[in-house]
Image: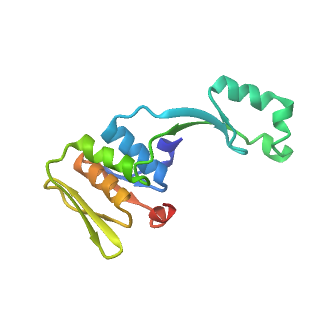
C-alpha cells in the first residue's frame, strides 16, 4: 500500500505525502528492512494476518454488518507494509545514522527547522530532526525526495 501512494516526480525524485511513505523509503533504501505485513479492508480498516483470513471475513455475514450496504461493493482488501517509524521517533532515526556509518554527520538547529548532512553531501532542512535525518540519509544514497508541505505537521 505504501509503495502505491508514492509517485515519481522526475527521473531521480520521489514525492511522499505521509510519514509512513518516508519510513518505507528509508526501510527499503537505507535499512533493507523486511516490513511487517498485514491485510485490511478499505472501509473499516480491520486488520488480518493473511489474505485468506481477510477474504473469509469479507464473506462472513457478521463482518458485513460493520460495513454499510452501499459501501460493500466498493470495499477492497489491501496489503499493508509497515516499516519502523524512522521519520517520527528519534531512536529509530538514530539507527539510520548508525546504519550509514558516516564518519561525519552534521545536525544543526536553524531557528524552527533542522539541518542535517552526511559526509560531504548537501544539507537537508526539515521541521523535525527525524525527518531531516531521513531525507539526508536518502539523499546520501542518491534518492531525492520531496515532501508535502503538511507532512511534518503529522509528528
Q: Position of residue 115 (x, y in %)?
A: 27, 65
Count of numbered marks: 0
Query: What is the image's colouring?
Result: rainbow
Q: Nearer the viewer, residue 9 or 85?
A: 85
Q: Position of residue 18 (x, y in %)?
A: 49, 55
Q: Nearer the viewer, residue 99 or 123?
A: 99
At x 38%, y 53%, the residue is 90
- Please, is residue 53 above or below residue 100 in the view? above
Q: Which image quarter: residue 43?
A: top right
- Please, is residue 109 above or below residue 21 in the view? below
Q: Nearer the viewer, residue 92 or 151?
A: 92
Q: Which image quarter: residue 28?
A: top left
Q: Nearer the viewer, residue 58 or 92?
A: 92
Q: Position of residue 135 (x, y in %)?
A: 32, 55
Q: Position of residue 137 (x, y in %)?
A: 27, 50
- Please, is residue 35 above or below residue 110 in the view? above
At x 45%, y 47%, the residue is 85
At x 20%, y 43%, the residue is 101
Q: Which image quarter: residue 126?
A: bottom left
Q: Which residue lies most toward the bottom here?
A: 111
Please give left or right for residue 30 compared with residue 41 in the image.
left
At x 51%, y 61%, the residue is 154
Which quarter of the rendering shows the N terminus? top right
Please give left or right for residue 45 compared with residue 35 in the image.
right
Please give left or right for residue 63 compared with residue 134 in the image.
right
Q: Which residue lies most toward the top here?
A: 52
Amino acid at each position: 500500500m505504501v509503495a502505491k501512494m508514492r509517485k515519481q516526480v522526475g527521473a531521480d525524485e520521489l514525492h511522499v505525502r505521509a510519514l509512513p511513505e518516508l519510513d518505507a523509503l528509508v526501510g527499503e533504501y537505507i535499512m533493507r528492512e523486511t516490513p511487517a505485513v498485514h491485510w485490511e479492508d478499505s472501509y473499516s480498516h480491520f486488520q488480518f494476518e493473511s489474505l485468506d483470513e481477510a477474504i473469509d471475513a469479507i464473506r462472513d455475514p457478521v463482518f458485513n454488518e460493520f460495513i454499510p450496504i452501499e459501501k460493500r461493493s466498493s470495499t477492497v482488501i489491501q496489503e499493508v507494509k509497515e516499516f519502523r517509524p524512522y521519520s517520527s521517533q528519534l531512536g529509530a532515526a538514530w539507527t539510520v545514522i548508525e546504519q550509514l556509518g558516516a564518519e561525519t554527520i552534521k545536525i544543526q538547529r536553524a531557528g524552527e527547522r533542522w539541518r542535517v548532512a552526511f559526509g560531504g553531501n548537501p544539507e537537508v532542512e526539515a521541521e523535525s530532526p527525524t525527518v531531516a535525518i531521513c531525507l539526508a540519509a536518502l539523499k546520501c544514497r542518491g534518492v531525492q525526495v520531496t515532501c508535502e508541505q503538511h507532512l511534518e505537521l503529522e509528528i
